[in-house]
Image (tube, rainbow, N blue to C red):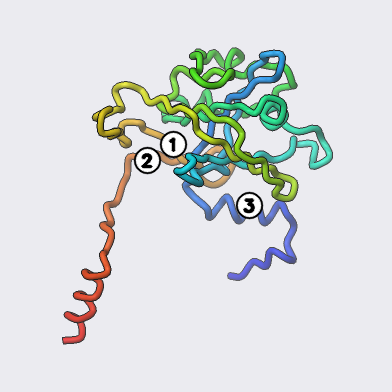
Amino acid sequence: MLFDFETIPTREAYKLMVSTIVPRPIAWVVSQDQGGVVNAAPYSFFNAFGDNPPVVGFSCGPRPEGADAPAKDTLANIRATGQFVVCLVNEAMGPAMSATATDFPPGVDELDEVGLEKAASTRVAPPRIAQSPVAMECETFQLVPVGHHTLVLGRVLALHVRDDCVLNAEKYYIDTPKLDLLGRMHGRGWYTRTRDRVDIPRTTLAEWQARKAGAAE
């Protein structure tokens, strides 16, 4: 079935994308305004985009009122301060993460509202979510307009990982399965666990060529 994005409405194109681009990692972004009021909101248009410098990015859309509405608190705060923290979401924190997506009015501290503990960051002013298994302290690398969204690219200055999820700090080995992270799926409330894994080893060029030679004999 062909869906021509030149002929279908934006909302329907969005539905097709989020129904097929899955699972998507979740950035639980903590920011604060110049007065120190904290904001937290989840974004699933999120991923890593570089390692030198280390850069992560998420896409922030307009408020529900539409493209002409003021920017969401997250984007407004980042534009004003240039700092934010990306926390990752495990299954236990899923309900709280979803609750912070509620369209609270500006000035509401979502972490206080849903009862989440804050922990001080080391390199940026916004706090991290204490219960989160991973938190990345970021400064703005670039803000890229993408239609009515803005792609926020952040340089990672520091990374916090829960102690029991670190296998070997000297070798930087992380127990990724123990993080128990969630991925975003289709629809309004569907997520997936990252415990189910499939090991597909990389094939070297030499192995590929040997395989082809064996098949030709």
Residue topped by disc 2:
194
111 vs 172, nearest the viewer: 172
Label 2, secondary structure: give it: loop
Task: Write the residue at 23% across / 79% down.
Answer: 212
Residue topped by disc 3:
15
Label 1, secondary structure: give it: strand
**Residues marked 2 and 1 touching at CB (< 8 Å):** yes
In the rendered structure, which amino acid carries the disc numbered 2?
Thr
> Up-down: is 160 above or below 27?
above
In the image, 134: left or right of 185?
left
In the rendered structure, which amino acid carries the disc numbered 3?
Lys
> Up-down: is 150 above or below 159?
below
Whole-percent x, y for residue 185 in the image: 50, 45
| Mark 2 / mark 1, whichever is N-terminal | 1
Q: Residues within 10 Å of mark 3 (few under 14, many from 20)?
A: few
Q: Residues within 10 Å of mark 2 (few under 14, many from 20)?
A: some
Residue topped by disc 1:
182
215 vs 209, nearest the viewer: 209
In the image, 104: left or right of 44?
right
